[in-house]
Image (spheres, grey):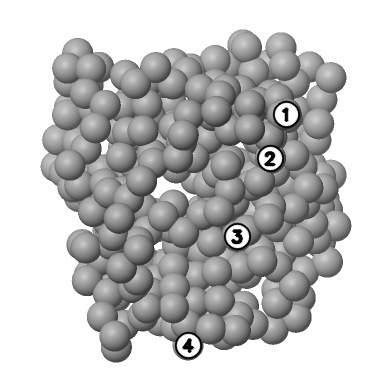
């Protein structure tokens, strides 16, 4: 299957650099990597055009900084994805070398996958070298434990285990979608009109998961299979009152069975406010302005149709 990886970021070039070093080490490389940039300073990301990152199939979808609008930039990124299967992670995570392979191995028709990251404190990950990341040394408890003794409690997650499937069942959670680590078929996210752009920070990713479940898309929580490190940081942009309101709205979604959002994929480009001065997609060789064709949103056919056309299997 064709795979697109979407990496979200905002003013964190060092974190994104580590994330992309993790992508360089993947046993299976995605055909396309889209960086969904929620308004970062472009000058901080010039390293993307330099070795070794210039070898990656990177495109950067960007819009001006107008506050926290992660869902908007993610919708724009989805609009530019070529893949039939989409894998999402945040730019402050480092994927283990089998991250993409594990998402594909566990993919099922009409199902989204999600997992949790392992939080690593700043004083630890600031010491990581490029070679330690690309060689996956940082996923060894014996490497981390001298500086960070708590690493030992994650031993069963750092390295592949024969108990992986059993532990996934043991830690099963219903309908949890973590925006920093999830994947699904492109036609499934299109069927619910993508991310809800009316949501601010706080369970905005879980809202998508509930609408997917309401639309008949199953969920799989794979805590011990989809492994990444999360580079811990402060979150000064959190508004507790807004978070509580949004979580209450999500609870109501289970009962209303709502599947669609009016502020989603279909109209993402119109709300991006991209202008001739503020282009919104960058590749190593060109800058592409907003194109009229992107405003005509046509969901892809169901995955069963894609499978029959390609003569392959969905899982």
Q: Could you tell me which secondary element the residue under label 1 belongs to?
A: loop
Q: Cα distance, mark 4 to mark 2? A: 35 Å
**Residue position marked by numbered label 4 in the rendering:** 43
Identify which residue is drawn at 70% across, 73% down.
53
Number of residues whose C-alpha sits closer than 10 Å to that of mark 4, classed few (under 14), some (14–19) or many (20 or more):
few
Task: Verify CB contact (< 8 Å) between mark 2 and mark 3.
Answer: no
Instruction: Pick the quarter of the image with the N terminus.
Output: top right
**Residue position marked by numbered label 3 in the rendering:** 33
**Residue position marked by numbered label 1 in the rendering:** 312
Find residue 105 and report its horizontal and vertical position in percent. 73, 30
Find residue 59 and report its horizontal and vertical position in percent. 55, 69
Q: Cα distance, mark 1 to mark 2? A: 9 Å
Q: Cα distance, mark 1 to mark 4? A: 43 Å
Identify which residue is drawn at 54% across, 61% down.
34
- Residue 290 versus residue 152: which sits nearer the camera? 290
**Residue position marked by numbered label 2 in the rendering:** 1
Task: Verify CB contact (< 8 Å) between mark 4 and mark 3.
Answer: no
Q: Could you tell me which secondary element the residue under label 3 belongs to?
A: strand
Eye-nearest disc, 1 or 3: 1
Eye-nearest disc, 1 or 2: 1
Eye-nearest disc, 4 or 3: 3
């Amino acid at each position: 299957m064709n795979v697109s990886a979407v990496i979200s970021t905002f003013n964190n070039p060092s974190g994104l650099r580590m994330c992309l070093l993790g992508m360089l080490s993947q046993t299976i490389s995605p055909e396309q990597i889209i960086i969904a940039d929620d308004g970062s300073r472009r000058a901080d990301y010039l390293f993307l055009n330099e070795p070794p990152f210039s070898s990656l199939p990177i495109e950067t979808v960007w819009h001006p900084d107008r506050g926290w609008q992660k869902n908007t930039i993610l919708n724009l990124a989805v609009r530019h994805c070529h893949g039939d299967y989409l894998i999402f992670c945040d730019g402050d995570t480092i994927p283990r070398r089998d991250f993409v392979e594990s998402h594909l191995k566990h993919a099922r028709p009409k199902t989204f996958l999600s997992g949790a990251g392992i939080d690593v404190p700043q004083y630890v990950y600031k010491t990581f070298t490029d070679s330690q990341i690309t060689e996956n040394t940082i996923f060894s408890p014996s490497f981390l434990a001298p500086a960070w003794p708590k690493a030992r409690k994650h031993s069963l997650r750092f390295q592949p285990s024969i108990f992986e499937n059993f532990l996934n069942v043991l830690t099963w959670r219903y309908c949890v979608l973590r925006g920093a680590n999830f994947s699904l078929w492109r036609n499934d996210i299109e069927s619910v009109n993508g991310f809800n752009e009316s949501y601010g920070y706080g369970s905005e990713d879980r809202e998508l998961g509930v609408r997917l479940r309401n639309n008949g898309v199953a969920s799989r929580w794979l805590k011990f299979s989809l492994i990444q490190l999360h580079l811990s940081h402060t979150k000064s942009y959190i508004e507790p009152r807004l978070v509580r309101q949004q979580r209450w709205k999500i609870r109501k979604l289970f009962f209303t069975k709502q599947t669609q959002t009016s502020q989603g994929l279909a109209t993402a480009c119109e709300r991006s406010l991209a202008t001739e001065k503020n282009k919104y997609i960058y590749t190593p060789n060109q800058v592409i302005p907003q194109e009229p064709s992107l405003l005509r949103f046509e969901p892809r056919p169901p995955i069963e149709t894609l499978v029959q056309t390609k003569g392959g299997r969905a899982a």
